Amino acid sequence: MIVSDSLCSDSRYDVVLVGAGIMSATLAILLHELDPGLRLLLVERLEEPGLESSSAVNNAGTGHAANCELNYTPMQSDGTLSIAKAIAINASFERTLEFWSSLTEEGKIDPEQFLHLVPHISFVWGEAHIDFLRKRFEKLREFQAFSEMKWSNDLSELNEWMPLVMSGRSSRQLCAATKVDRGTDIDFGALTNAYIDSLLATSSIEFRKGFAVIDLNRQGSSGWRLTLKDQHSSKDVYSKFVFLGAGGGALPLLQKSGIPEASLYGGFPVSGKWLVCSDEALTSRHYAKVYGKAKVGSPPMSVPHLDSRWIKGNRSLLFGPYAGFSSKFLKKGSRWDLLNSVSPSNIGSMFQVGINNFDLITYLFGQIRQTHVERFNALKEFLPKANSKDWKLSVAGQRVQIIKRTTKGGVLQMGTEVVTSADGSLAALLGASPGASTSVEIMLEVLRRCWSDRLATDQWQKRLSTLFPSYGKDLNADSDLFIKVRQRSDSILRLV
């Protein structure tokens, strides 16, 4: 149980959050909303918040709601379609929208700073892929969350949905698509800054930029001592609760914590690349996020998509992702990150994952060797009339895929995972997509694990019910409630 002390020292805090990205910022504002008296410290080693994975230039900006991401509805070996992950991700994103709506209603954030309405489209060609998409459409449409999804295999209608994609495409090519108009593009870096600005205005949080956490040690029942270091000095701070939300940098700090749970994890870094176009003549002709299907044998991270993107108010097109390799765990990290993360407790799992995921190794090796011509050819499958001179290569952020030791050996996990100490005094977030879009649900999970006693109090329950009108209820099991919640979010966030 986490309890606020009566603090009498500048070096003592109720909560220390490491890494000023979307995850730490989300947890910080949630905790402040539940208890404005908590003393929070946010630590960031870079000069500004949200510059790593949360930065708009380092991610696809998709509000992941499973509207268009075909890898969230995989075909099983028995020929059936699994939609459980899609339903869960959609519900988590609705929870996020509920939270943003409440903060907007109270004047604490402005959705115009980070949120754009843009259709989400799944686009495939070839009989087998069209059959898959049709089954997906029919199964998802049974749920209220996807009731407004549209289907088409009519070329004229597809041309209306995505004229740039259909231009120059053979009329003999069999194509189909589904479309959800209520899709979003999100600048998570701008949202991170909006959260932090709102907190700084309350004087409940201290924000230290340019400080790295170089060590952390348990101090018995009193919590944790963290050593912070900038270019000139170092300082120890103390906290009852620590959250490691430093993206790829969370794993090394989790390992330094020495908690037994940390020994289960290793990580493998994967860098991302995009082809980006800022030509207004082209960006004005494409208004959607169009997701395709990964090629047979390719990992889920390779799902190709062509996105309308807004970065610092400017509209562009983004196509990818293309994978690369760097031993860094952060874009602005150290080349020794991977090697330093290897320990006797995880080296076996890492080798086993390498052996069992040879297709991923092959894919990454092929991606590293790709030429610009090869990348451009992949783009032309989406945009037959694409011109190479209109597109430039951009390096995105680093992902650290989770490698976990289980009773069945080492397992590679593609999603996000919350790791907590047994006493609930430390939590860390590992993994990658769809993390940012589901950050609110993930941080509620941190509260359930680490703040359970406070979470059960009338004060916290009452505030949670205000922030989340559907709190404690299953949206997918109550159509009337789902419609009511969605209409509220649409109205406040102007998603219509």
Image: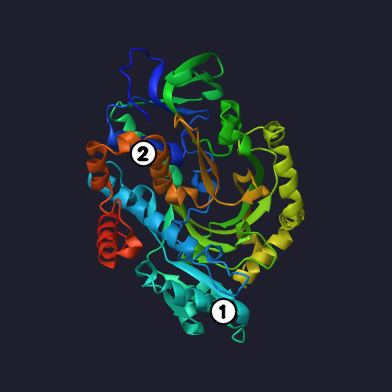
Q: Is residue 484 above or below residue 58?
A: below
Q: Pinpoint residue 429: horizontal percent, then vertical percent.
A: 51, 40
Numbered disc in front, either 2 or 1: 1
Give the left or right position of residue 372, taking residue 158 as reference: right
Under mark 2, the amino acid is Tyr
Tell which of 46 and 465 is nearer to you: 465
Q: Residue at x 69, y 66 (%)?
A: 377
The percent coordinates of residue 193 (x first, y second) are: 40, 38
Q: Nearer the viewer, residue 337 or 263?
A: 263
Q: Residue at x 32, y 24 (%)?
A: 4
Q: Quadrant of residue 148?
A: bottom left
Q: Earlier in the sequence, mark 2 or mark 1?
A: 1
Cα distance in 3D space between marks 2 and 1? 42 Å
Rendered location of residue 165, percent (x, y): 55, 72
- Spot occupied by residue 65 in the image (x, y as percentages of width and height): 43, 60
Residue 187 shows in this picture: no
Mark 1 closeness class: few <14, some 14–19, many ≥20 residues within 10 Å: some
Choose between 185 and 160: the one closer to the eye. 185
Position of the C terminus by quadrant: bottom left
Q: Which mark is residue 330?
A: none
Residue visible at 39% across and 17% down in the picture: 12
Which residue carries the number 2 mark? 195
Using residue 232 as the reference point, say whether residue 337 is left or right of it: right
Q: Is label 2 in a helix, a strand or a loop?
A: helix
Residue occupied by mark 1: 130
Does dot 1 land on a helix, a strand or a loop?
helix
Near mark 2 (Cα within 10 A), the count class, few <14, some 14-19 or many ≥20, is many
Q: Is residue 185 above or below residue 384?
A: above
* Residue 321: quarter of image: bottom right
Judge whether residue 234 can be spotted in this image: yes
* Amino acid of disc 1: Ile
Q: Residue at x 46, y 34 (%)?
A: 20
